[in-house]
Structures are given as C-alpha cells and as structure tokens.
Amino acid sequence: MSENEVKSCLLCGVGGQGTVLASRIIAAAAMAKGLHARTAETIGMAQRGGSVVSHVRIGETIASPMIPWGRADVIIGFEPGEAAANIKYLREGGVLILSSRQVKPVTAALGQSGYEGEECLKWLADKGGSCVVIDPDKIIEACGSPKVLNVAMAGALAATGAMGLSISDMEEALRIRMKPKLLEMNMKALRMGAECVTER
Amino acid sequence: MKELLMGNEAVAMGALAAGVQVVAGYPGTPSSEVLETIAKRNPGHVYVEWSVNEKAGAEVAAGAAYAGARSLVTMKQMGLNVASDPVMCVNYIGVKGGMVIYVCDDPGPISSQTEQDTRSFARYAHIPCFDCDSPEQAFQAVQDAFAFSEEHETPVILRSTTRVCHACADIDVPEIRNPEPPEGFVKDTSRWVIFPKLAYQAKLKVAGREPALAAEFSEYKGNTIEGNGPVGIACGGISYSYVKEAIRGHEDSFTVMKIATPYPFPTDLARQFMLGADKIICFEELDPYIEDALIYEYGNLSLDIDNFIEGKRTGTVRLGGELSAVEVGSVIEKVTGIGTSISYDEPEAAEDAPELPVRPPVLCAGCPHRGAFYAVKKAVGKRPAIYGGDIGCYTLGNAAPLDMVDTCLCMGAGITMAQGLDHAMREQEDKPTCFAFVGDSTFFASGITGIVNAVYNQSDMILCVLDNSTTAMTGHQPHPGMGVTMMGEKVEPVDIAKVLEGIGVRSIRTVDPQNLEESMKAVSETMEEEGVRAIIFKSPCVALVGPGEPLRVDPDKCVGCMMCINEIGCTALIPDSSSLTEKGRPKAMIDKALCAGCGLCAQVCPADAIVK
C-alpha cells in the first residue's frame, strides 16, 4: 500500500447482524499489519431493527472516518436491500460482497412499503467490478450459530483481496478479538466465507 | 501498546492516564461508553457510579473535586440540561481537584431530541471548553482539560460529537496506575458556600478571567493554523477531518485554522489567521459558534473586505444536520472555484432501482413493551385516551401498528404533561383518560418528582411503568431498581411499587406484559378508578435474557387473517406469499432467526395457529 493510499470498506445491514464487530475485526487485521485504521459506526436507537452502517478505512494518512460517496473500495451488504440503499458509496469497479438473505421490515409486512430482497440481489449483480453472493444459511448451519455471518463476510473480504488484507491477517485479528472458546467456530466461518469467493 | 479505541474509550483511557479518582454519569447516546470503559479498565481505586441522573452525577463529581480529587462526569447534551443547575453554580465556586464535565453533542441529530451546541452553553456559563476532533486528539484533550481545570481551579467542559464518540482509531495506550489519594475537604465558608455577595465577586472573576484564558488558549498546541494559502478555512471538531479530506491535493490554496478550545475563544490566534486571509469559510456543525467569534473579532479588527466571512450566517453552510467531506468540498468549490477530487453531487438513483426496504427502528421481537402497549390499547378500545410517551426504547411504541405514543418531550415529561393535559381538559365532556408510559430507569432519573406532583395536586391519570429491569436503549446500564452498582456491588434494590406506595399512590397493580389477558384485566380495572393510579408492567428486556424457543405458524390452522402482523407489528412475523389460503391470501410465517418465543402473537391469533 503506497503512502497516501487509503482503502475504504462500507458495511451495511440491519441492527443486530453484527456489522460493528465485523468492522472491528477488519480494523484489527489492518493494525496487526502495522497500518492505521479508523472506523465509524451506528450505535444506539437505530440498532433496534433499523438500518445500520459502519465505515472502515485503513492506510497511512486517513483524514476522516466517514467514506465519501463513490469512494468505497468494497461494500459488504449483510442484507440485499441495505446494500442497494448504499450503492452510491461504491467506487467504479469496486467490490460487492452480499449476503443473499433478506430481512423484511415491519413496514413491508404491514403492506406500507414493498420490498423483495431477490430483486435487489439481481439489480446489484452488475453494479460493481465484481460481486460475491454468500448464502448465510449454509455457513450458519455448518458452524452452528447465526452469529458467525459477520466473520464469514470478513473471510470473503480477505479472499477478494480488495482491502489488501489476507486470510492470515484476519485470523490474527480473530485471535486478538475473539474469546478463546468461540475462536474455532469463527475460524471455520472465516474459511467458509473465503471459499465462497474462490468457488465462483 | 496500540489498541483500536472508540472516541469514548479514548476519553476514558485519557482520564485514567490523568489520574481520575471519581467518575459519575447518566447513560445517554453517544456518551455512555466513557464510564463503562473506566469501570472495565479500573486499576482498582477509581470510584465509578451510574448516578440516578445527570444533576446527581454532576454534584457527586463537584463534591469529589471539592475534596481535591480529580473527577469526571459524563452525559449527552440533553443531560447537560438536567445537570445545568449544579454546573452553572459550580463554575462560580470553583474546584480544588480537576473537574471535567464530558458532554456529547449529537449533530443530525442521530439519537436525540435537539441539535443544541455545548460550546454555546460553555460560553453562556463561562466554563472553559475543550473540543474533540478525533479519538487520538480526545485522548490528549481530556488530560489537558484536567491539568487546565486544576491549574485555574475551574470546572472544564470537554465537548465531543457522535462521529468522534463512536469512531475508532488505533491509539497507543500507556500503562494505567492508581492515583495518589486526594488531600481531602478543607472547610472554608468564604470559598465553598454560595451567597449573593460571593456570587457577585465570582461573576467578576469568571467573566473577568476571559481575556487571560483566551491568551493562554492562543498558545495551546491543540489550536492550530496549517498552510498559508489565500483562502482561510475555520473549523473545529469532526469538521476538521472533513476539511482535510476535502482539500487533499489542493492544500496550497488554503490556510486551515482548527479551534480545539472554543471558550474562551483564542482571539490572538484568530486575529493572526484573519489578517492573512483574503476570504474565510467556516465549517462547523450545530451553532455558528466559531463563525460568530470570528465576526466579532472582524469588527474589532476594523477590516473592510466584502463578503469576508462565509458560513451559516450567510447561508453558505446549512444551519442544521451533519456535515460531510462531500458537503465541505462542494461548498469550497462553490465559493472559491477551487475543485477537489471528491464527487460532490449525490449520485442519482438509477431509474431501474428496485424498491428499497423502509426500516424505521422498532421494538425488538419479544420485547415486553409490545405486550404492555397492546394490552392498554385493547383494554381502552374506542374510549378516548391520550398516551404520553417518554425517552427510552418505549418511544418506539409510536411505530405502526401499535401507534401508542401521542407525546414525547424529554425525560420524565410524559408523567407531568399528563397532569397538564388532565387539568386543561377536566371540564371537557368525554374527557380522555391520560396515560403516561415511563421506563424503569427513567422513573428513577426524573419520574419520581412528577408523581409526587400528581399525588399532591390531585391529578387524574394512569401511570404505566414499563419495568424491563435495565436501561435498555443506551446499552443495558444498571439503575437503582436492579440491586447492582457499576462497581459490581450487590445492593438492596429500590422497589418501584414501594416508592409509589410511599408517595401515596393508592392504586398499584403489577402484571406480566407477556400475559395479555392478565394485563388487559389490570388496565380495565384501573380505568374504573379515579385519581393517580399505577400499573407496573414487569418483564425483563429480551436482549438481556436472550431469546426463548421460537414459535411457528401451523399452516393447516392459519386462516390468513393477518391479525398477528397487523395488530402487534413484531419483526419476526411476515406474510408468506408462497403459502396461500384457499381464498388466495398469504398465511403468516415466523422468522426463526428473529422470534424470541414470547408468545404474544399466539395470544392474539384467533385461530390458535401459532404453536411451539
């Protein structure tokens, strides 16, 4: 990474999906490599089933924790509709990493708004330079916990190389951030997430 | 060692590094993590408490500072309103140990009722104020604030904003040691007891010291002037980072002044900045605070340059809401013609874009508040009623389909506003029943005095305490009703029913909001009575106890009536377009990953189709 280069990753989803921890893991992976890291997160009221966004920026000279429009090298969408809502942040040729599982908002269940995750996924397919779609149900079942989705997404991010972070950088971050008894399960999720990229 | 620290964690570690001894506060987004981090990283001898509210916290901190200890009180900007009584006075009296009042503002606002600016409060109160622009700078600023407070025997406000509080950066954290014990309180009525005569002398002191402190701040290393381009940019706080990002690659055209001590304003530095500029643009969130200070100095300098200072006062920068690097860059280009590499215009939504999810925050699946609101709604039925809301998770009872919040003002206001509504409409035919919903933490923070007022002044109202045994919205902080302190001690919990009884509330019922029939019966019975009545809906926060076994919809029984979805609006309930009734209506479906198994929907379903 050159001196002035800043890599930016936007994580978006629904409150409770673990986007905050994912952004911390990515930042920790960068720090383990000796890079500076900044993040900015949605905490508080919006976490109750609302839309949440985390910004992660790594590099030597990061000015602001917030990513301007069109400057994200990667968008990690924990939910298809949330990824579509934040597509304006993606730079031309940027990478999309998406979870295929939709979370229907109450407004849609009540018929006040329409929303189909499937349509958003289709629409997003050609919006970046490349697009990785992850089926979270498979990984969650294999790992035995719905809480591993965020780590799987981080694994996919490493496999794309879009932030200049490798799988072993992420593994190092997991060793720093995770409780020992949860480490093995998350290492598995990390690898399964990465495999979704290589399998394409 | 380098750690990834959130702005609030950096303030906490900086306070520990400065030898803070007593820490108090009341939770409020975006300020809560400071106190929690100090409790977690306590080297052993730091006293930490969640106070009952911000006024109590500020007074605890002031007392500790009188005894010579370094003390810290934390709150959000709304909390400063609650604490303003002691804060306004303690400045007149002064302190012995360093006292830092950490206040988080919330531009946007993202999770607050107002966009008030604590820098303006500091000027109004004559309290020196430091500002934070990044986690690493905040780590240093809190240490500088303690030193300044002690040197000048004055409380100091440390101001931060959401994007600094909740941003993370990698910071070198020093080893934390226990501080030396303070000297203790030394009696001196001429110093510690406020009387009108002393207050007059104090006013002369706090207003009169302004020029000397301003001169000191002009030399403070946190206030900076960078570059020597013709266009001056004045900024402070998070706006500084947006400016840096916006002018990247074009630095030669600009001189950037960053204000890290808004009050007293570093006048000498500002003069130096203005005399070198052809034109000045001010970027700051909330009030045009720096802008006004510059305009004032501009008058003093008797400069005569057309359109010299631009900002909020000239309509160049928006009066409200958050700033961003994009907005800063676009304003700079509009005013100066100097473009940067950031794209300024929000990319247009593609014409073929699919419909996006609309996702306002809602009560969690399994939240006991949902049951309480629904029980009141059903029991009241078509009778006239007004539902006073309050500040906490239960504000989310406003969302469709519950629609159970008619008013929401500030902490505790639901209780006392119900009394005003009642008194104003007493003579009205078919007078609505006035309900006030309040959470357990808010009950202790600012509900009790309102209930005393109701009993004393013979109000006619129904108080609904939604007791989920935690301060849920801000991240599950303990409170007096829980029997545990922030130091981890087990203590006798303050019993809400006994408090009400002691105040003189004669009708008190305690029910489980997850039991719909029992809850509705309690509401109906209470409505038959008069005077101040209370119902305590008691059931723990689902986020604390964790989800139970999820329920499922039996498709053979579901008639597709959608009552479960349309009545209670639980996030786990969705219509299943792949499973239709004979009449072609979608049946209900439960999202296993979200359902907490509370069973409220099963009690609502007329076809008994929701089962374990």
Image (cartoon, grey):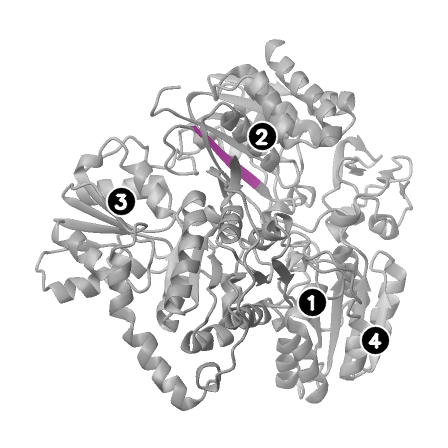
Q: CA distance from mark 2 to mark 3?
A: 35 Å
For badge 1, the amino acid type reads Val
User: Which SS class for mark 2?
Assistant: helix
Q: In this rendering, do the residues under marks 2 and 4 share a single chain? A: no
Q: Which residue is mark 4?
A: B508
Position of residue B332 relative to residue B113, above or below, is above
Position of residue A198 relative to residue B605, above or below, is above
User: Which SS class for mark 1?
Assistant: strand
Q: Are marks 2 and 3 in contact (CB under 8 Å)?
A: no
Q: Chain of mark 3?
A: B
> What label does residue B438 carry, if any?
1
User: Which SS class for mark 3?
Assistant: helix
Q: In this rendering, do the residues under marks 3 and 1 share a single chain? A: yes
Q: Which residue is mark 3?
A: B331
For badge 4, the amino acid type reads Ile
Q: Chain of mark 4?
A: B
B395 left or right, relative to B30? right
Name the residue: 87% across, 52% down: B603
Q: CA distance from mark 4 to mark 3?
A: 59 Å
- Residue A28 is situated, as x and y percent measured from the top left of the image, at 54, 30
Frontmost residue, A63 versus B261 = B261
Residue B54, quarter of the rendered image: bottom right
Mark 2, Cα crowd under 10 Å, few <14 / some 14-19 / many 20+, is many
